Image: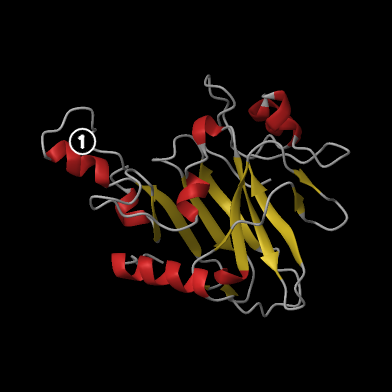
Amino acid sequence: MRFKFLLFTLFLWGAIANAQEIEYVYEDTMNHLVITEAYIHWPHTSYLELTNMGDEELRLDQFKLNYHGGGETLDYTTGKMEGTDAGHNLPSVVLQPKESYVMAAIREWEPTQFAKGLRGYNEKRVQDNMWELADFYVYMDENNGEDGDTVTPGHSNTFGNLWWGQNGLFITQFFADGDSMVIDQVNILFEGEDGQSQNRINREPAERILSKNPACGLEPSPMRAVYSISSSM
């Protein structure tokens, strides 16, 4: 899917998401929505790929995305993250079986300032291929939403907290009865007895993950707690 959200659609979606509650319809756990690829490094180059690995279509707005900042824990009994909320609803998109959906951080305001000849701004802040590959542009807050700065409500904060690969991402599903649970995560390993993410605490994520799943394709980076490319565990 390579549908591009226009600016007015972004604003409209954000307004609707904030103005009314989404009706949750699923009664069973949809654990076949999987984080198949993620780049978690700088807020302006991070992206997330979600894939429907099941045999039936999925409504993405039944799920929320948020970042894990290090102090949160996972309750193994309830499947809920403790110490933070579930984040923000994914876009209102129906994902077909085996179809993928890419969300990418976009910074376009800074290059416009560079084009004006202003000092201290970069000419380019987005990977060239991401304009084509991404299905949903997460416009980052570059100037508090002023002077032509477009900001995507909610998700800009999530992607804005992915500095240096320190933080991870998790997806929470909501059910028709009002319950919820975490169904997938990346750059987080919940292996502590109290639901702590041990890799976030010990700062040696790549080695730990490779020892548990050597086929996952992760490569350690010399930078602090960074995954070059992350895959869902």
Residue 160 position within the rendered picture, expressed as x and y whole percent measured from the top left:
47, 43
| Residue in front for this viewpoint, 230 or 168 | 168
Q: Is residue 78 above or below residue 120?
A: below
Residue 193 position within the rendered picture, expressed as x and y whole percent measured from the top left:
88, 38
Horizontal arrangement in the rendering, residue 196 relative to residue 144 (left or right): right
Residue placed at 15% from the left, 32% from the top? 118
Quarter of the image where one finds residue 5: bottom left
Quarter of the image where one finds residue 122: top left
Horizontal arrangement in the rendering, residue 112 relative to residue 137 (left or right): left
Any part of residue 160 in sight: yes
Horizontal arrangement in the rendering, residue 184 relative to residue 198 (left or right): left
| Residue in front for this viewpoint, 16 or 222 | 16
Residue placed at 62% from the left, 71% from the top? 62
Type of colouring: secondary structure
Residue 80 position within the rendered picture, expressed as x and y whole percent measured from the top left:
77, 55
Q: Is residue 224 above or below residue 23?
A: above
Q: Quadrant of the N terminus?
A: bottom left
Q: Which residue is mark 1?
A: 123
Residue placed at 18% from the left, 44% from the top? 112
In the displayed orientation, state which residue is furthest to the top. Answer: 222
Residue 217 position within the rendered picture, expressed as x and y whole percent measured from the top left:
59, 37
Any part of residue 93 in sight: no
Residue placed at 59% from the left, 56% from the top? 65
Horizontal arrangement in the rendering, residue 21 relative to residue 102 (left or right): right
Query: Residue flagged by tag 1: what amino acid is it?
Result: Glu
SS at mark 1 in the image: loop
Q: Quadrant of the C terminus?
A: top right
